[in-house]
Image: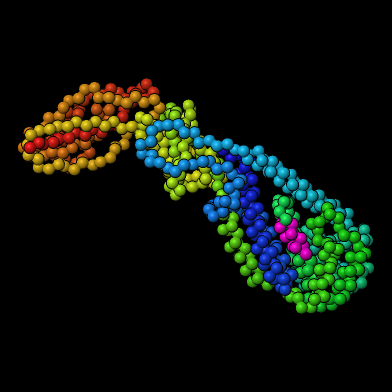
Amino acid sequence: MTLNFSETALAFLFSCLLKATLVFTLAWAVASVARRSSAAFRHLVWAVAILGLLVLPVLAFLLPAWHFTVLAATARFWIARQPVATAPDLSDLPAMIVNAVTSAPARQWSSIFLLIWFLGVLFFALRIIIGLARLYRLSARCAPSLSLDLTQTASELSAAFNVKRQVSLLANNDPSIMPLTWGIFRPTILLPCTAAHWPGLRRRIVLTHEFAHVARRDWLFQICAELARAVYWFHPLVWLAAKRLRQESERACDDSVLRTGIAAPDYADQLLHLAATLKNPSRAWSSALAFARLSHLERRFSAMLDSSLDRRSLSTNTKTAASLFVLLLLVPLAALRLPAQNAAGKFSGTIYDASSAAVPNATIILTDPNTNKVAMTASDAQGKFAFVGMPPGDYELKAIKHGFDDYQAHQVLEAGHDATQNLTLKVGSVNDEVNVVAQGNARGASASPSGKTARIPVGGAVQASKIISKVQPVYPAAAKAAGSQGTVIIHAVIGMDGAPLSLRVMNDQIDPELARAAIEAVSKWRYSPTLLNGNPIEVDTTIHVNFTLQP
């Protein structure tokens, strides 16, 4: 099966879905345990969970992969795996064509699922953009608040909350609009035009609440929550997290107001009055932080009137510890690759010979030494081959064809990446052996090295050389008298005219007389030239000359 973009993207989305479930389940558990803690702490829990969810896909691309095989059964449904078989002994495997191809029945469904997800993302992204555009347009129509009392109170609260950014106070012409706060670098607080005539207590309560939002950067976290809902619009826990984040931000700001010394009953009374007389923002402005949303009032009243609750703000050490904990959780979670992501895409290449000609019908084998499984395919008429749907891992690559030496290499396949490697096959070595026997007393045989020598790489249509004229070596009298025997291993190059060239004795421990006799005889041998695609080439050869004394 060829994994196209839609299948790879769907596998990645499915992985992010499982990780998001884990993150928000953990956040829900921590927030539930900390229900008697301050609202600021619970807001921090939901905020770091949402930020972690947005950062996870980025870290997944930056960090090296960590494959957790225990989760294999979870994601097996999403990817049709390429069938593999237990690896046989490949040492004597003949050249054959095995096309490893599977069908892809899930490809069409993966494209449909991905399209539905994309349309949902587009819808919610447009909703966010429209809401921001309406906020910009509303702010552009508002005039700066010139009320001396409002300006003075805002200046005091800016210093009290240590807000270094410039905060704009704008008066809306609509006298019934609910106070709103939005913006990151230049926060904006929208007030109704009647705010200049509010009683001093109401004015201080509203501005303290809104400046607490600014100091805590609640609007930034709320925008992140909206983005998370846009990407994971199908996940109910993401919607729950965004809702809880907004609720806890309002309660944390209520605690900020109560910490200034304002009595809880007075605060509740003013909040109830504003909720009854002012209009809540429309759905298109959902990203703005409204002072009194009706859906939140009951819990806010209950919390502000409960004197036993913890209303402390968060310390720097708490925020640092929470950030470190989230980082330690996100790094391994982002590096984790579920089996649904384990498709390596495509591993392909072309097989050439020394003349850069394509080699067709060569068998290419990938063996996983960890699982002892093998997959095979064959090169086509243009020498091209491809493996698709292979799990990532370290593989032993082998290419074989009759008349050629085996090609072996190490190949690493990474998840979700296409890999390409071109191969050059080498011609099979030419080996000849001649026995020289004489009567005499053997003194002992000289050791000879084993193994093949390197040869010139050739491929394509190969016609191997054959010996057409052989001169029998003569056993040297001096070696016979000394009782010397053994095998002389000679490396030579068969020239394009069939004559041996560059003769070299490979075992230095052999008797020099035996080596001389072997070289003299082999130098007179003649071969038919080795042909590559009809053209003569030079090729390495190894010749064994055995000198044996019989009693």
Residue 496 located left or right of residue 140:
left
Q: Residue at x 16, y 39 (%)?
A: 486
Based on the displayed image, in which of its 4 quarters is residue 89 positioned? top left
How far across and down, in percent of the image, does residue 466 sit? Answer: 27, 24
64 shown above or below 194: above
**Secondary structure mainly formed by the magenta segment:** helix
Q: Nearer the viewer, residue 493 or 17?
A: 17
Residue 419 located left or right of residue 219:
left
269 shown above or below 507: below
What residue range appears in magenta? Answer: 237-247
Magenta span includes 499: no
Q: Is residue 243 visible?
A: yes
69 shown above or below 256: above
181 shown above or below 540: below
Q: Is residue 502 visible?
A: no
Q: Residue at x 93, y 61 (%)?
A: 175
